[in-house]
Image (tube, rainbow, N blue to C red):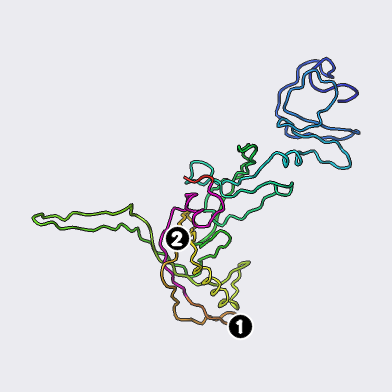
């Protein structure tokens, strides 16, 4: 209100004609002394100048200027939001899938930061979704463009690049058997199970890289850390720059080539080796149930 009048249309309005229903995005408060600012989506009939003290779903902002400039509904939200879910959608998904859920107890819980190592290359959509009375509220969606070079081997909270001297081969396993009955010219082909899973080999040099430089002095320690990661018996996500995702187990032994000395700088050099490992597909990297069962995400709300 200003001098007892409102800017909206009623008998106490400063304007005689009806207000235009525009979608306002910016509200500027300046050049005056204001006791209170209130904005709502609800239509208030017979407005008597009193501003509601309680937040509703129609409330947009409510600033009381009581020693601060806060105008949001953080306390209101914290009191009704039970949980927040983070959902993801890629070009291979028909709908958003929950990859993270957090119970809300305090205002600080509403601030969520996660690092998604399982993000494929390409366009990825993330949704921040409040849960109220057991139901999902409006989605707050962010779109990111994921880009990287080479291959990465990832778990839920770890990721190692396979970049240097990298080579990759893959085969689709279609296992069959033949039975040759007596008196028949052609054998009978037997296919047991839903075959078509993938397997293959990767070969590369594991040397830590940061700020476009190779940390050659700790190459041995870094390589051993990678080996501990590879042999921890946990399934991994193998992803590449083309957007492919594979849920794999490391299969068999890890082998190293002969060490080769590389001159580096005026008087320094280092030894590098090429590491070879085999993998076999063990599930669907785009299926929530498979990711949850293999300890790659913490929720299976959208299990298919």
| Residue 21 in the image: above or below residue 163 | above
* Residue found farthest to the bottom: 267
- Please give the label number shown on residue 248: 2
In 3D space, how far apart are the residues under numbered discs 2 and 1 (Cα atoms)?
42 Å
Query: Residue 216, percent across and down?
Result: 58, 76
- Residues drawn in magenta: 274-300
Q: Is residue 240 left or right of residue 111?
A: left
Query: Residue 78, percent across and down?
Result: 72, 42
What residue did someone put label 1 on?
266
* Residue found farthest to the left: 183
Q: Residues within 10 Å of mark 1 (few under 14, many from 20)?
A: few
Task: Label 1, secondary structure: give it.
Answer: loop
**Which of the 4 image quarters holds residue 51?**
top right
Which residue lies at the image location 37% right of the left edge and 56% below the top edge?
197
Which residue lies at the image location 42% right of the left edge and 73% below the top edge?
253
Nearer the camera: disc 2 or disc 1:
2
């Amino acid at each position: 209100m200003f001098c007892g009048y409102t800017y909206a249309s009623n008998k106490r309005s400063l304007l005689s004609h009806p207000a235009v229903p525009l979608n306002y995005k910016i509200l500027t408060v300046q050049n005056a002394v204001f006791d209170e600012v209130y904005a709502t989506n609800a239509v208030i009939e017979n407005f008597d100048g009193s501003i509601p003290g309680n937040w509703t779903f129609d409330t947009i902002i409510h600033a009381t200027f009581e020693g601060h400039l806060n105008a949001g509904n953080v306390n209101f939200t914290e009191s009704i939001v039970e949980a927040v879910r983070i959902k993801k959608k890629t070009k291979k998904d028909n709908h958003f899938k929950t990859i993270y859920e957090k119970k809300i107890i305090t205002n600080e819980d509403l601030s969520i930061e996660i690092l998604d190592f399982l993000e494929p290359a390409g366009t990825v959509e993330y949704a921040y979704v409040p849960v109220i009375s057991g139901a999902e509220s409006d989605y707050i969606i962010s779109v990111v463009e994921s880009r990287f070079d080479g291959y990465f081997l990832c778990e839920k909270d770890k990721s190692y690049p396979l970049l240097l001297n990298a080579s990759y081969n893959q085969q689709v396993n279609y296992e069959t058997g033949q039975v040759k009955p007596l008196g028949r010219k052609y054998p009978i082909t037997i296919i047991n199970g839903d075959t078509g899973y993938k397997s293959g080999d990767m070969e590369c040099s594991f040397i830590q890289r940061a700020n476009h430089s190779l940390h050659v002095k700790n190459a041995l320690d870094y390589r051993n850390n990678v080996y501990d990661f590879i042999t921890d018996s946990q399934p991994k996500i193998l992803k590449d720059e083309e957007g492919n995702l594979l849920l794999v187990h490391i299969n068999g032994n890890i082998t190293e080539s002969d060490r080769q000395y590389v001159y580096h700088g005026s008087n320094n050099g280092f030894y590098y080796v090429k590491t070879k490992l085999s993998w076999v597909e063990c599930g669907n990297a785009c299926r929530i149930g498979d990711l949850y069962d293999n300890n790659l995400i913490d929720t299976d709300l959208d299990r298919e």
